[in-house]
């Protein structure tokens, strides 16, 4: 085998690989000799068929396998011998005479091109100065959460037939919806329990039932939103004939030990502690988001090296697909497509750069993702597809590339942890509102 470097410009590498026909035929003979003892051919005792006869029967198929194996082997060798790591899948250019190669009458010659990962020295993260905003959990937040839990346990009692329905009352209704006088699919319901003001139905529906009494028939006129999930109803005007069979009023649920027991805890103190812990966890995640953004900004500013265009293109394509499938932000609506593409191209470059920096820091620090963390992530992913958990698990277990996609964000967080442990992180008390602000982060793994 002979590997010749034809060009090396920036991160682009171009090699020519040549494997003599004699080497191919030697490998073919060895392969045929290996299978000779396993095949049983008519007219020959097992293992006694001559190699020349096997070559006639299986030569082309076996040679095709040999060529595929050699292409993989020689491509890897071309880069590994020079301590180069391809950034994207190498591209191969094969000659037109591949039939002659498969028949063992010509050398295997092909070109392989790929961009390589850049070499760079990552910034020293020891002592990096970062500010981490933190906030105390207001008692008001705890009280509001306890009240929401109590509201979820609300029960309703029938009101007198002469009492008009108010906001937060529950109505038991039968309804039939019509468009242009014709009932439509999904527009009928019997015995439906509707809490006024809960937003269970489309805007405007519940408002028109405020003031209704038990036994009333109400005509409700609404217009389906333009973005309604059922396209055939989006933007259409509809009339609902609603029969109110009962009006029920909410019965307040006390925030006490009994409420805690209803949700599976021993006492109000336990419930309050659980709620406080959950809010504190949320605040910690917000704090981490801000300090991580600050860290990524510093890493981005500290590194400037050539990026593999293929990686940037792939990242940009993914971002642009998301942009095209979503509504533009107000500040982007007046920009041209070229302006938007230029901005999102910069975001793609940032993500690729930070991804490479974090990967290099993590590799040098020998950061690893424990198998139990990966398995936990796999199980959580499978659970997000109810009824298909087994198929999802099998898909990931059989696809190393898919498993790597699960591992990547876990690895990134481990590297961020590694850096934060070595950086000088100063906590700064801020208001809840400040903590809740979007850190405007561009997660390199997003």
Image (cartoon, rainbow, N blue to C red):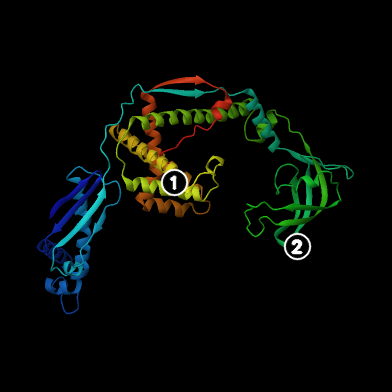
Among the 4 quarters of the image, the one containing residue 94: bottom left
Q: Secondary structure at mark 1?
A: helix
- The residue that label 1 is drawn on is 341
Q: Position of residue 404 (x, y in %)?
A: 36, 46
Q: Are marks 2 and 1 in contact (CB under 8 Å)?
A: no
Q: Nearer the viewer, residue 77 or 393?
A: 77
Q: Secondary structure at mark 2?
A: loop
**Quadrant into which the N terminus falls:** bottom left
**If you read the primary sequence from the N terminus, does the residue marked by circle 2 or circle 1 appear first?**
2
Q: Position of residue 2 (x, y in %)?
A: 12, 54
Q: Nearer the viewer, residue 421 or 150?
A: 421
* Left or right of residue 420: residue 224: right
For label 1, count other residues whose C-alpha is less than 10 Å away and answer few (under 14), some (14-19) or many (20+).
Answer: some
Q: Position of residue 161 (x, y in %)?
A: 88, 45
Badge nearest the viewer, 2 or 1: 1
Please identify the residue farthest to the left as the structure is shown.
22
Q: Nearer the viewer, residue 206 or 313?
A: 313
Whether 303 is drawn above or below 87: the answer is above
Image disc number at residue 365: none
Among the 4 quarters of the image, the one containing residue 197: top right
* Left or right of residue 385: residue 149: right
Disc 2 from disc 1: Cα separation: 44 Å
**Quadrant into which the C terminus falls:** top left
- The residue that label 2 is drawn on is 180
Whether 445 is drawn above or below 277: the answer is below
**Residue sitting at 44 percent across and 41 percent down?**
343
* Left or right of residue 161: residue 372: left
**Residue sitting at 37 percent across and 48 percent down?**
313
Q: Position of residue 141 (x, y in %)?
A: 63, 27
Please identify the residue farthest to the right as the structure is shown.
162
Q: Is residue 358 visible?
A: yes
């Amino acid at each position: 085998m002979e590997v010749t470097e034809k060009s090396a410009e920036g991160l682009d590498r171009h090699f020519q690989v040549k494997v003599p026909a004699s080497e191919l035929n030697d490998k073919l003979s060895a392969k045929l000799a290996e299978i000779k003892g396993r095949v049983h051919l008519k007219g020959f005792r097992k293992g006694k068929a001559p190699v020349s006869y096997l070559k006639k029967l299986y030569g082309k198929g076996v040679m095709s396998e040999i060529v595929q194996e050699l292409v993989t082997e020689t491509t890897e060798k071309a880069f590994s011998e020079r301590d180069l790591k391809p950034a994207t899948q190498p591209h191969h250019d094969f000659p037109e005479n591949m039939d002659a190669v498969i028949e063992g009458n010509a050398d295997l010659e092909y070109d392989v091109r790929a961009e390589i990962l850049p070499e760079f020295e990552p910034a020293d993260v020891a002592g990096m100065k970062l500010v981490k905003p933190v906030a105390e959990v207001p008692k008001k937040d705890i009280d509001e959460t306890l009240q929401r839990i109590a509201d979820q346990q609300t029960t309703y009692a029938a009101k007198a037939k002469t009492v008009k329905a108010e906001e937060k009352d529950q109505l038991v209704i039968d309804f039939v919806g019509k468009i242009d006088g014709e009932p439509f699919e999904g527009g009928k319901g019997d015995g439906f329990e509707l809490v006024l003001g809960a937003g269970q139905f489309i805007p405007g529906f519940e408002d028109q039932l405020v003031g209704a009494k038990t036994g009333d028939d109400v005509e409700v006129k609404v217009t389906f939103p333009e973005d309604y999930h059922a396209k055939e109803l989006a933007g259409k005007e509809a009339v609902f004939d609603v029969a109110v069979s009962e009006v029920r009023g909410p019965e307040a649920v006390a925030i006490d030990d009994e409420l805690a027991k209803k949700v599976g805890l021993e006492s109000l103190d336990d419930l309050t502690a659980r709620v406080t812990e959950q809010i504190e966890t949320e605040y910690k995640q917000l704090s981490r988001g801000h300090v991580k953004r600050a860290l990524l900004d510093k890493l981005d500013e500290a590194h400037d090296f050539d990026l593999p265009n293929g990686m940037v293109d792939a990242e940009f394509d993914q971002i642009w697909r998301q942009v095209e499938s979503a509504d533009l932000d107000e500040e982007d609506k007046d920009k041209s497509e070229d302006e938007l593409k230029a901005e999102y191209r910069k975001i793609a470059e940032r993500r690729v750069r930070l991804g490479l920096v974090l990967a290099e820091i993590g590799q040098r620090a020998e950061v690893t993702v424990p198998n139990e963390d990966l398995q936990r992530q796999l199980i959580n992913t499978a659970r997000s597809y109810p009824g298909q958990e087994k198929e999802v698990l099998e898909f990931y277990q059989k696809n190393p590339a898919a498993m790597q996609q699960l591992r990547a964000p876990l690895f990134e967080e481990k590297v961020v942890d590694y850096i934060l442990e070595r950086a000088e992180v100063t906590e700064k008390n801020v208001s809840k509102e400040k903590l809740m602000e979007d850190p405007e982060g561009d997660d390199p793994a997003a």
